[in-house]
Image (cartoon, rainbow, N blue to C red):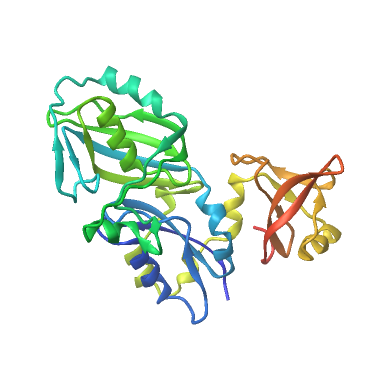
Amino acid sequence: MFSGFLNLWKPEGVRSSWCVHEVKKLLPRGVKIGHGGTLDSTAEGVLVLLVGKATRLSRYVMALPKTYVVRLQFGIETDTLDASGKIVQEKPFEFVDEAMIDVELCRFLGPIMQRPPAVSAIRVQGKRSHSLARNGAAVCHRERAVFVRSIRRLTNIGENGEVTLEIVCGKGTYVRSIVRDLGRNLGACAVTVRLCRMDLGPYSRVMACDLAAITENNDISKFVAPVDGLLGSYTTYQLDELQEKTVSNGQPVLIEKLQRLRWGEIQPGRVVFLRSRRLLSAARPMIRSGAVFAFPETTITTGQAQ
């Protein structure tokens, strides 16, 4: 049984769950598969699939920063916040210029409160929000905190009111909501026309595989990368044999006694990774008796570190 991550390029017009199902058919019986964060069916981009024991690392993949390129159109707003929905509002946009957009974009930087779209994968009393909304139910989610690392305009405004943005953000951020709020804040309303996720942490468009290429190949294992690729985004420590045994038993290890292999872009105060020849463990740093320990949260056995 093999484990690892499959960097898939999801095409526009299909669900992330369909992609998972198609890849699952290519795996040996009994091998688990999951994902590191879905994409809207109307979006395309990097979809990281988790295979085998790597499925236990899902939340750490989801926590990785994501880069989106979104083309929006000023002047209209739809019930789905993208081009697939029905127009619910129209407003003039000709007064909006690039300088106004750039100033307003600054308001989206850092931690912000955001209301998710009604058409989303969020569960409401056990049912998907998009299913309820499309069946006519009134769905209004509470605002929640999200984080936007950077946001910038890539193009000037076209004659039809279209402009392209690049957004780097954290888990749970809805780009469609950013576009909606940008339009409303400028007094012009706006809708997402095209959305593309260019990367998820170290997993980028450049290295992504098309589903057709995977299905045409007889050996899917060629497309499954080792779990160590995740470690470039997290602060990682090396375990010796004694420390490995301690962690495998679920016990904490003193961080100052560990050899640090690398710093990561994810804050080490939340989670660090511990690596040895035979295991990989996500651990939470905590202070006990004046010292910082790494308490194992999720540990999987692997082969030799890559």
Question: So how many labels did they put on this image?
Answer: 0
Q: In this view, does 188 lie to the left or right of 222?
A: left
Give the percent coordinates (x, y) of residue 71. 25, 38
Above or below 230: residue 263: above
Q: Which quarter of the image is occupied by the N terminus?
A: bottom right
Q: In this view, does 155 lie to the left or right of 216?
A: left
Residue at horizontal 45 percent and vertical 33 percent from the top = 112
Residue at horizontal 58 percent and vertical 64 percent from the top = 56
Give the percent coordinates (x, y) of residue 277. 74, 62
Q: Which of 43 and 288 is in front in this view?
A: 288
Give the percent coordinates (x, y) of residue 31. 52, 76
Furthest residue toward top: 99
Q: Is residue 254 left or right of residue 172?
A: right
Furthest residue toward bottom: 29
Residue at horizontal 43 percent and vertical 46 percent from the top = 199
Q: Which quarter of the image is occupied by the C terminus?
A: bottom right
Give the percent coordinates (x, y) of residue 223. 47, 64
Residue 289 in which image quadrant: top right
Residue at horizontal 22 percent and vertical 25 percent from the top = 187
Residue 188 in which image quadrant: top left
Q: Nearer the viewer, residue 214 or 43?
A: 43
Q: Which of 234 and 95 is in front in this view?
A: 95
